[in-house]
Image (tube, rainbow, N blue to C red):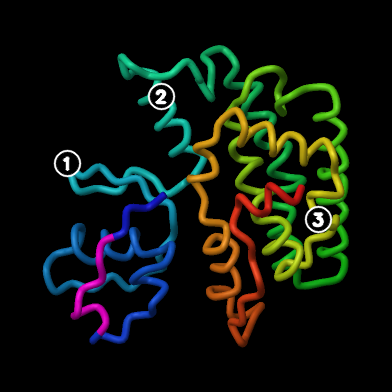
Amino acid sequence: GWILPTPSADDRKANIAEELITGDLAGVYNYCYRDILEEGEKYKGRCTAPLLVDTTTGTIVTNESNEIMILLNDYARRLPDHESVDLRPIGREEELDDATKHWFDLLWNGSYKCGFATSQVAYDEAASDVLKGLNEMNEVLASRPYLLGEDVSEVDLKGFSWVTRHDYAYTVIFKSPGGRIAQYPNISAWVKRLVSDYPKLLDSIDMEDACGSYYRQLFMLNFGRVVPYIPNVKDWVAGL
């Protein structure tokens, strides 16, 4: 997660939105305003997270999450004391990319298509993809421990990010169908296996903030910016 700077008095005096000072966009905001631009220059564009920055040259490398995951895994692979887990084994890149596209089209992007559909036809098509994806994922995980087989991969981590947002963000604010993850026994078992085999995953996500940010930021879908009850990730996993 982000290591966020302490908000300065100047930030608060300038009436900058709290989300940009302490929330999940703070790392991007503070870097763009304080470290990239010339003194006095103000960034007026849209902030997105995550952001990978080359602090030596002062340039943005990429803000595409899939590219960042590939780069970080490659970096970890080169470390002399790296652990044995390789999320993107050499020789399996095409298989991994195909799997990423498959689940992205059905689930990861499908939920967003539900949320931003501007017609009933568009919503129905996206909702159908999400339902198909949930049932297919549950079926796939009936015969294997991880999405691509016996070993964990980058696809599992991407899937984990999606399922932890499904119940309390996508199903509510995006009207993404399918009910709760707990209704899918094999997906539930996969989630529990992931956090049991790799317990640091539980420290990688602030589920209350991750889901809550949708309600705080997407004012066009939630005009009052009211945030419903959202459990922490450990309690959510325990309830699966």
* Image position of 167 (left or right of 47): right
**Residue displayed at 81% across by 55% down:** 180
Mark 3 residue element: loop
From mark 2 to mark 3, how far is it between C-alphas?
Answer: 35 Å
Q: Residue 74 — which label? A: 2
From mark 3 to mark 1, how far is it between C-alphas?
Answer: 45 Å
Which numbered disc, 2 or 3, marks the residue that appears first in the sequence? 2
**Residue displayed at 65% across by 56% down:** 165
Taking the magenta stretch, the answer to whether it contains residue 164 is no
**Residue displayed at 56% across by 63% down:** 208
Q: Please say if the residues under marks 2 and 1 sit with CB atoms less than 8 Å apart.
A: no
Which numbered disc, 2 or 1, marks the residue that appears first in the sequence? 1
**Residue displayed at 85% across by 44% down:** 184
- The x, y position of residue 129, in whole percent, is 83, 49
Three-letter amino acid code at the position of disc 1:
Thr
Taking the magenta stretch, the answer to whether it contains residue 6 is yes
| Residue 141 in view | yes
- Nearest the eye: 2 or 126: 2
**Circle 3 is placed at which residue position?**
180
Provide the residue span drawn in magenta.
Answer: 5-12
- The x, y position of residue 187, in whole percent, is 78, 39
